[in-house]
Image (tube, helix red, strand yellow):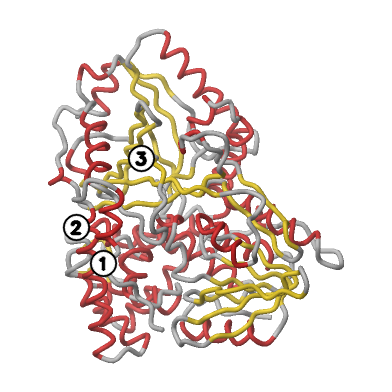
Amino acid sequence: MTRSTKLGPEERTAAIERLKSKELDILVVGGGIVGTGSALDAVTRGLSVGLLEARDWASGTSSRSSKLVHGGIRYLEQLDFRLVREALTERGLLLKRIAPHLVKPVRFLYPLKKRVVERAYVGAGMLLYDVLSYVGGRPGVPHHRHLSRGQVAKLVPSLSHDALVGGITYYDAQVDDALYVASLARTASAYGAHVASRVRVEGFIKVGERVVGVQAHDLQTGERFEVRAKQVVNATGVWTDDTQRMVGERGTFKVRASKGIHLVVPRDRFQSSMGLLLRTEKSVLFVIPWGRHWLIGTTDTDWNLDKAHPAATAADIDYLLEHINAVLQVALTREDVEGVYAGLRPLLAGESEQTSKLSREHLVGHSVPGLVVIAGGKWTTYRVMAKDAIDAAVDALDGLVPPSTTKEIPLLGAEGYRAAWNKRGKIAHAFNLHTVRIEHLLNRYGTLTDELLDLIKERPELADPLPGADDYIQAEVVYAATHMGALHLEDVLARRTRISIEAWDRGVSAAPVAARLLADVLGWDTEREEREVSIYLKRVAAERASQTQPDDESADRVRLEAPDIVTS
């Protein structure tokens, strides 16, 4: 049966109709990286699958990570070799097979401050990192290398001369986390999963002690309906405890939220041909190349306030600036910061009081018949987490269900990507676009770039960039709504593109233009269009104001002054 590869309004409506009308094998609750991964895992085993997300795809933790696909150098020090090996195996799969258009190698420098002992210690760790990356096959990135002080000075001219005696370079990978999750949801839909965002689960349906479905609320239309399923998978991340309470269960494990913030600064604020990995007194600090920007993060602090909109404080921002400035010749200031974002890690609570010491392992529980809970873990190992969750659900299903196949399943846009990349100059010439523009599209949509070029062929003005956000063209806004599941202006500016953190004005000037484009696709009237812009501008203002506050409580209060986009 041929399914549409689009994930637009019509596909959403059709998915909800199917969810209402038939009992599913598996219903996944939560549209982050683990939930969307679970839906793809289940549907590619031949099961009937539904996926519900209360807000937008990746709107929680999964769009606010360090955007790294990595083994986790610091877990070697904690002797968690199994987690590192597993993550490095997944890194190789993502780079080479599953999503080569979205996941890219990135080079880092680890500056050394002591001549012999530190070089030997860190070098041994880097060697082990390389060895572990080979366990699951070819790693897809080069090995680590030792550098002298002079070599480091040439490669990273902006580093303070007295900040190091040499360095070691190594490779990991990076990804646009939110775009990846939207692509994952779309791929699951293309394989037959019935996926719908902006549908909130408000309760579980039980027969005796057994969970047999959920009570759902379509926030776009206001409609309430039931979805029946043989097994429900709770993949709600930092909301796991809240979701479990709906069943009347305390749950077999507790999830704690750890806040991590990142700064976005222009690439020209300091010179370096690679990213940096710096030690802090609490954890590690990454400086990550990100297009025409640097991402600097992250912090690691307990968070017990609003989970939907974690807020960065002035103290968080100052902490990161202080640590990066310790190694730079010319200090960064608050005026250099283009964007700030805060996210929550779902950590499995344990004995330790420090969130930086809590486990990044994941656990699967089946504490109530009919309900599987998956919690913990890290972005990089989402595919393994999804496999383990669906394995647990399948154990309770009748009949023989095939094992997971997601090792072999590329995301939409991945097949033929390298051949398309090799033709990028010819494609650019054919459409009278700059080669850099085609490279940008290929690295976001892979071979699906053809679909955006078709839009431009029909409407040449869609090749124009968005105001204040030159990296993105208008066709991407239209495509976000027609093919990538975006339903609101915020979905486009914050997650299908990263304008909300990359643009100096955080998308204020792009908002009216993007809203006009979305209105045509989503059937908005003028009042609705203006409301979408107004709510987005209030979000930007509230985020900016929260980032001047001294502590979490005041930042949270200020951030929550902006209304959410909820239409019912």
Is residue 148 positioned above or below 63 on the image?
above
Mark in the foreground, 3 or 2: 2
Q: Which residue is mark 1?
A: 561
Identify which amino acid the numbered label 3 is placed on: Thr
Q: Position of residue 524 (x, y in %)?
A: 32, 89
- Which badge, 1 or 3, is on the more N-terminal residue? 3
Identify which amino acid the numbered label 1 is placed on: Glu
Mark in the foreground, 1 or 3: 1
Q: Which residue is mark 2?
A: 545
Q: Circle 2 — which element?
A: helix
Q: Which residue is mark 3?
A: 299
Quadrant of the frame with the C terminus: bottom left
Is residue 459 positioned above or below 170 on the image?
below
- Which badge, 2 or 1, is on the more N-terminal residue? 2
Q: Position of residue 559 (x, y in %)?
A: 27, 61
Q: Circle 3 — which element?
A: loop
Pointer 1 local density, CA inside 10 Å: few below 14, some 14–19, many at least 20: some
- Which badge, 3 or 2, is on the more N-terminal residue? 3
Q: Position of residue 493 (x, y in %)?
A: 30, 67
How far apart marks 1 and 3 lie (CA) works out to 24 Å
Q: Circle 1 — which element?
A: loop
443 left or right, relative to 538 = right
Q: Are marks 3 and 2 in contact (CB under 8 Å)?
A: no
Q: Are marks 2 and 1 in contact (CB under 8 Å)?
A: yes
Find residue 495 and report its image quarter: bottom left
